[in-house]
Amino acid sequence: MPYEVTRTTLRYMTHLPPPAEELRLLDAELWQLDARRSQLLARRAWLVAALHRTQPSPAQASPQPPHTAPAPPRAETAAPSVQNALLVLGGVLLTLAAAVFTLVSWGHMGIAGRALVLGAVTVATLAAPVALLKRGLRSTAEAVAGLGLALTVLDAYALHAAALPGTGGTGYAAAATAVLAAAWTAYGLLPATSALRLPLPCALAAAQFPLLLGALAADAGPFVVTAALLVTAGLDAVAVVLLPAGAVRVTAVVGAYGVGGWGVAGAGWLSLTADGPVDASRAGALLLLAAAIAVGSARRGPGVGHALGLAITAGLLVVGALGGVARSGLPSQWAVPAHLVVGIALLAAVRVERLPEAMRRGLAWASGAVQALAVLWTLPVVAVVLLGPAGWLGRVWSGAPSDARAAVVVDAPWPPHAAVAPVVPVAVAAVLALAVRAQAWRSRARLGAVGLLWATALILPAILEIPYVAGMLVLGVLTAAALYACRITSSAAQVTALVLALVTAAGLTLVSLASQSATLVVLSVLTVLFGAVSWRSDVSPFTAPAALVSAAALASASGAAADWPASRTALPVLAVTAAAALLAARLGASRATVPVESVGAALGLFAVGLAVTDPPMLALVLALCGVIAAGTALRAERRPVGYAATALFVLAAWVRLAAWDVGTPEAYTLPVTVPALLVGALRRRRDPQASSWTAYGPGLAATLLPSLAAAWADPQWTRPLLLGGAALLVTLLGARHHLRAPLVLGGSVLTLVALHELAPYVVQVTGALPRWAPPALAGLLLLALGATYEQRIRDVRRMRQVLRRMN
């Protein structure tokens, strides 16, 4: 239809629906289309991102999707955040301005005038949030309310400066904080301002100070100040229980922990520094008050973890309170046992069924912590008993001490509280054995009890100052009992018994060093004990090496007792090494084989070290070590030890030659060359493709090179002649069998020997020639080389090919 007809026709048509309604419908449809388009664009963006994530590499990537317009930049801060920041900044600036106005000056107005003006401004400021809340401006209302609360603090200062200048500052601050806390609470609870979140937390924060400041204003002692802190913390705890979750409750929790922590620290300090039972009782009462607050909070407060931590704290506070009171009436060495008794008594609360599970578990943990700390208190005594005898290492066989205590305090001081130390491990062992009922922990508790009883038996001889021999007898019985306990089938019990046996045996050995007879007897007994237990395969990887070490120590001690030199003592030590090799062969594939062999090797090195000052004895020891290594190499799984045996035999030969003052190098190198050539020949027989350098090179070089160096320094003709003949023989054998290593090494040595022998004659001939002869001969040589250059190149290439065809 033509446009003119359409325009004319539409002019006289009636719109159904009316234009306004149709426009509304069109806008609604367009809005729906825009919303749908936004959904489709979001879906498309997600699909594009998913495709990008699944593509493994740019090389395998599919064609890039059509370019889309970049998204508009995202705002880094939200509008509410900006609003809050601006409101807080404005409130801070106004507060600072009010403080300057009140504290400094404003024109010529006095403090009274400034106080009246500030009061009027405060009233207006506190009233403003009501109107702001009605208009829905809550954030602005909060900011203005915060400004009003800050102005009330300045009002309190202005009142003190204008009307009550003679009142004490601390007392006035206590009263002012109490009034402000009450006023802020009332302001926050008003119906018109109850929607504000700031007044009530501020009121609770201000309530932390009245009691403390009041106690300080009254010049009360430290006990009253600490009590004020604890009472404040208790009121905070009540608020935590009663108030619902929110900012007020968070403020109460922070106040309870903060103020309560300071109160507990003060009470603990007062208990530690108490001069008598009265002061200790007062400090203990404060600690019990803190414990009561913690218990109440644990029972009423939310959260299992919260209750567990508070229960542990309450238990420790009870121990500190009652233990501190008991400590004030007892000698100082009984302080820890007194606290331990209270800690053990806490376990009675675990049986109370009415207490929550978290509280009972927390009290049990508190009791365990006290017992653990008490056991740590006894460790210095155990350390002195175990490590103190190490001082005998510098005073071996200097004489038996008078008693067991003198045997352990060689250079270490004796702890002053050692007399009561056995009480602690015995008490804790009893608790572990009787109080632990859980099946999962019962076996571990019993092992712990055994360890504590062992520690008690270990330190008792030194504490009781029994005779020296009796003290060693106690240690020997403990070692034997621990080794016998290794027969227990439980792996954990075996490990515990084995560790106790090894530690006790080490301490017994150190204690026995004071006397020669004691050392010999103790080492003999330990060798027998560890050897007897080694027949059990479960612990033999540890007891068999211990038996060998004890036997080696016994051999060394026996040699020293017989006044043998150290080099001669190496022979009985080497006998222990031989016994270790025989035992390893007897054990076979047992788990103890490797530990026994390792200890045997270490003892062999120890024997070599003992004999190092006597070359003939050192040669003998090295040869015997070679025999032991050769015997070990007879076992199929220990064939590589044969190389060590060969090295030991060679070293033994060298040491013997050096002891005989033999200076001929061939005497040292031929014992190496001959076995090396034999081994190379065997290898070539097994593997004909093996290179002659690896088969014969090391053996030939071991003799030819040192002999060549000696021949060049030898003025006689015998050595060069023999070396030249040997090099010629090696060269001919290499050429005969097409072996590269003998041919190259023999030919090189032969050439160098010939050069050494002909050098004097060359020098004589050169001196007899006229001066023009050497340049002329050099020119002729160069001409000859130039004329036959290509032939020489062909000869070199042919020689290289011949060498390549050789092995």
Image (spheres, grey):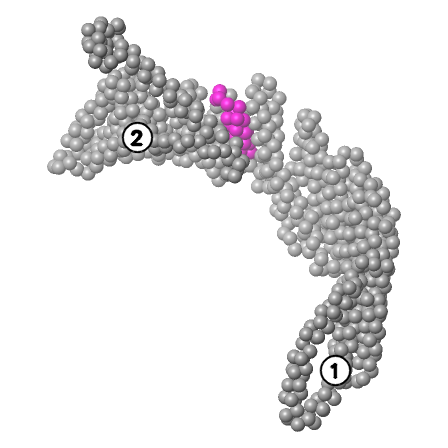
Mark 2: secondary structure: helix
Mark 2, other Cα within 10 Å: few <14 / some 14–19 / many ≥20: few
- Residue located at (37% from left, 21% from top): 37
Which residue matches tag 2?
82
What percent of the width, then of the height, locates residue 455?
70, 41
Viewport quadrant of the N terminus: top left
Residue 582 left/right relative to 382: right
| Closer to the camera in the image, 79 or 222 | 79
Amino acid type at circle 2 is: Val
Query: 97 above or below 604?
Result: above
- Residue located at (28% from left, 27% from top): 143
Which residue matches tag 1?
756
Figure quadrant of residue 577 = bottom right
Viewport quadrant of the C terminus: bottom right
What percent of the width, then of the height, locates residue 780?
66, 85
- Residue located at (59% from left, 30% from top): 365
Q: Is residue 317 magenta?
A: yes
Q: Determine the CA span between mark 2 and mark 1.
A: 98 Å
Amino acid type at circle 1 is: His
| Closer to the camera in the image, 50 or 78 | 50
The stretch of residues the image draws in magenta is: 300-325
Inspect this view and state whether residue 138 appears: yes
Q: Is residue 290 magenta?
A: no
Mark 1, other Cα within 10 Å: few <14 / some 14–19 / many ≥20: some
| Closer to the camera in the image, 408 or 773 | 773
Mark 1: secondary structure: helix
Inspect this view and state whether residue 628 appears: no
Which mark is in front, 2 or 1?
A: 1
What percent of the width, then of the height, locates residue 681?
85, 62
